[in-house]
Amino acid sequence: MTEKKKEELVFTKKNYQLLLISIAIVVVGFVLMIGTTDIYDFRKTLLAPMVVLTGFGFGVYAILKK
């Protein structure tokens, strides 16, 4: 009995592309946090963490997308 087992990758090319986009979004969020000026600035306290969380959420979506 010779069965050829079709091996599938866990992720597709689209999953990897979406994952790279999510990593880029997270990096942009951390870049927004950089700086030594006003520590209580809107960009550092609200915008940057929201961008990072959006990137992580997009990463979860990229992993779960089938």
Image (spheres, helix red, strand yellow):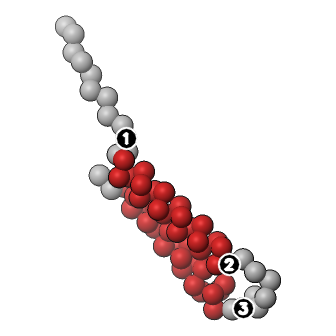
Q: Is residue 59 left or right of residue 4?
A: right
Q: Identify which amino acid the numbered label 2 is placed on.
A: Met
Q: Nearer the viewer, mark 3 or mark 2?
A: 2
Q: Earlier in the sequence, mark 3 or mark 2?
A: 2
Q: Identify which amino acid the numbered label 1 is placed on.
A: Val
Q: How many residues crowd mark 3 within 10 Å: few (<14), some (14–19), many (20+)? A: few
State yes or no: discs 1 and 2 in contact (Cβ < 8 Å).
no
Q: Which residue is mark 1?
A: 10
In the rendered view, tell whether residue 30 sits above or below residue 6.
below
Residue 37, image x, y percentages: 78, 88
> Which residue is drawn at the image coordinates 54% and 64% (left, top)?
24
Q: Is residue 23 left or right of residue 44?
A: left
Residue 4 shows in the view? yes
Q: Earlier in the sequence, mark 1 or mark 3?
A: 1
Residue 66, image x, y percentages: 29, 52
Q: Which residue is mark 3?
A: 40
Q: Quadrant of residue 35?
A: bottom right
Q: Is residue 42 left or right of residue 1?
A: right
Quadrant location of the N terminus in the rendered image: top left
Residue 46, image x, y percentages: 59, 86
Q: Identify which amino acid the numbered label 3 is placed on.
A: Tyr
> CA–CA distance between discs 3 and 2?
11 Å
Q: Which residue is mark 2?
A: 33
